[in-house]
Every structure is written in C-alpha cells, then in structure tokens.
Amino acid sequence: MTPSFDLIGLVVADMAASLAFYRRLGLDIPPSADTEPHAEVTLGGGLRLAWDTVDTIRSFDPAWKPAAGGPRMSLAFRCDGPREVDRLYADLVEAGYPGHLPPWDAFWGQRYAVLHDPDGNGVDLFAPLPGV
C-alpha cells in the first residue's frame, strides 16, 4: 500500500483564537471546538486540517518545543478573485491579525498577500489575475 497524504496538523497556543482566525477564512469549524484539545475539519477533496493544543502535543511528547525563527510552512487559500484577496486581507488585518505582505500583483500571474495566524504560521491569499 502506498501512503496517502491525509492531514495537515497545526500546534496552537490558544485553540479559540486560532479557530476564530480560520473561521474568518471560511472554514466550517463548530464553536464547541474552541474548548477542545484537538479539532479538525475535512476540506474539499478529503484532506483534513487539524489543530492541537501545546498541552495535547506535550501529553505524548514532553520534550516538544516550537520551531524557532520564521514560519517554515504556509497554508494558501484560493480566493474568488483579486478583489477578494484585497478584501479578505484588509478584513483580517483590521481584526488584529498580523499582515506580512499586503496584496500585490505577483509576476507569476496572481494577486497575492501573506499574513500570519495567531501562532505565526504563514497564511497566503491568492487569486488568478484577469487574463492570465
């Protein structure tokens, strides 16, 4: 049997704060998950995105420490169009989430923006530019 890619896991310091961010990106996460040590959603195509608290991770890996330095990965969300990239980026920054690179027209043919979730993970917003 060949392994199949099934889940992306994020370790979070504050479950409710992290889930609030991802709800703003349109993920359907039940409010009851805010107080749980583990939460997950199934995305289109069957891939799952999961969140675990630091305490949950340390329950089976007591020596776990967060990575040092900048984010080493990012999650990219495709938007309906360039205006949606601009709107969503502005909405999230206005709500207090840290913007990193404001929307720009990237040379590879997309409207692109980068911000960080409450745990410092990179979150990219993108949409194809018209005519590309």
Image: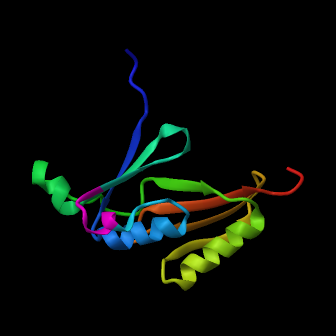
Quadrant location of the N terminus in the rendered image: top left
Residue 64 visible? The answer is no
Question: Is residue 40 covered in magenta?
Answer: no
Taking depth in this image into account, of 93 and 84 the one nearest to the observer is 84
Residue 54 visible? The answer is yes
Considering only vertical position in the picture, is 130 above or below 25?
above
Residue 38 placement (x, y as % from top left): 27, 56
Considering only vertical position in the picture, is 104 above or below 51?
below
Taking depth in this image into account, of 99 and 87 the one nearest to the observer is 87
Residue 44 placement (x, y as % from top left): 55, 44
102 left or right of 61? right
**Dividing the picture into quarters, in which one does residue 113 lie?**
bottom right
15 left or right of 86? left
- For the point 56% across and 85% down, the residue is 94
Q: Which residues are magenta?
A: 32-38
- For the point 44% across and 68% down, the residue is 117
Q: Give the total of numbered labels.
A: 0
Residue 6 placement (x, y as % from top left): 41, 36
Colouring of the image:
rainbow
**Dividing the picture into quarters, in which one does residue 71 lie?**
bottom left
Question: Is residue 37 covered in magenta?
Answer: yes
- For the point 43% across and 33% down, the residue is 5
Residue 2 placement (x, y as % from top left): 40, 18
